[in-house]
Image (cartoon, rainbow, N blue to C red):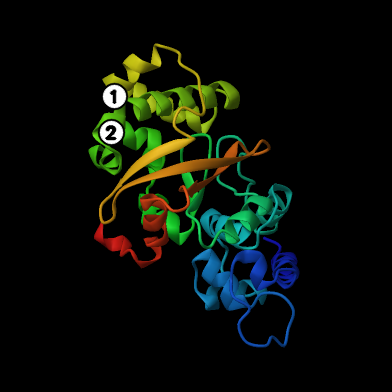
Amino acid sequence: MDRAGLAEFLRVRREALQPADVGLPPGNRRRAPGLRREEVALLAGMSTDYYTRLEQQRGPHPSDQIVAAIAQALHLSLDERDHLFRLAGLGTPDRIAQPDHVSPGMMRILDRLADTPAMVVNSAGETLIQNPLAVALVGLETEFTGYRRSIAYRWYLDPTTRERFPAEDHDLHTRAHTARLRAAVTRDGPRSRAAEISDALLRESPEFAELWQRHDVATRLTDQRKRIQHPQLGLIEVFCQILADPDTSQTLLVYTATPGSESHEKLAMLSAVDVTAG
C-alpha cells in the first residue's frame, strides 16, 4: 500500500470536483477548492473519519469494497479506478467479470436527472445506481447481493419481483429478460457475470431453462413502453429511454410519461412517496 501516493491521489481528485459535478447542492461559501471530505465520505457510504484518515496517510488498509466506493464517489474513469486500487495495494478488478464501475460521463448525466426516475444497469441486469425517484418508482434494487442482484435472476426465483408489473405483461417481461441475458452472454463471453447468472438460472429454474433453449436474442422487447404497478400510486405507464455505454456494456434507463397524462402526474408525485411502504 502506497499511503503517500494514495493520500495525494485522493486529495487531488477530490479537489478537482465541484458539488454540481456529483449532484450535490453548492452549500455555503467554500474556503478550499473542490469537494469537502465529508461530501466524498457521504457519496461513498463511509464515515468522514475513515476517509479523512486515508487522506492523512494514517488509515487502515482499505478493502476492495471501500476502494470501489471511493472510486465511484470521485467519478473516476476505469484507468483511474485501477490506479487507485494499485495505490491501495489491491489487485485491479476484472473489467469483464465485475462490470460494476459506472463511468464518470454516465454519473454526470445521472446526477443531473434530479426530477426524473433514472438508473444505471449492467449487461447482467444488475442495478448499479439509482436516483431517489427511481427507487420510489421500482423499489430499491441496489440492496441485493449475489445472484439476486440481477433482475433476470429475481424475475424467475423471487415471486415478489413480478408484483411490480401487471399479470398480463408477465409473459413479455419473461421473454425479454431471457433474450437480453442471452445477448449479454454472447457479447461478454463465458467468463462474464451474465454467463454466471444464466448458469445459475439453468440449474435453479425449469421455466428459464425451457425458454433458454429457444435462443431468443433481443435487447429492446420492453424498453420502449412499460406498465408499472406501483404499490401506492397504482398503474403507471412509462416510456423507458436508454443511453448505452459501449465501453462498459452498461445502460442508463430514464423513465418518462406523456405530458398531461395521469401517469405523468403520478411520476410528479414520486418525490412524496414513502419508499419504505412498499
> Mark 1 touching mark 2, by CB under 8 A?
yes
Residue 46: x, y in percent? 50, 69
Looking at the picture, does residue 190 appear above or below residue 268?
above
Q: How many marks?
A: 2
Check disc 1 and report its element: helix, strand or loop.
loop
Q: Is residue 4 visible?
A: yes
The residue at which mark 2 appears reads as 157
Relative to residue 269, is residue 27 drawn left or right? right
Residue 138: x, y in percent? 37, 49
**Mark 2 crowdedness (10 Å alpha carbons): few <14, some 14-19, many ≥20:** some
Residue 261: x, y in percent? 40, 50
Looking at the picture, does residue 137 appear above or below residue 224?
below
Check disc 2 and report its element: helix, strand or loop.
helix
Amino acid marked by disc 2: Leu
Q: Earlier in the sequence, mark 1 or mark 2?
A: 2
The residue at which mark 1 appears reads as 205
Residue 76: x, y in percent? 68, 56
Residue beneath the point at 44% across and 32% down: 222
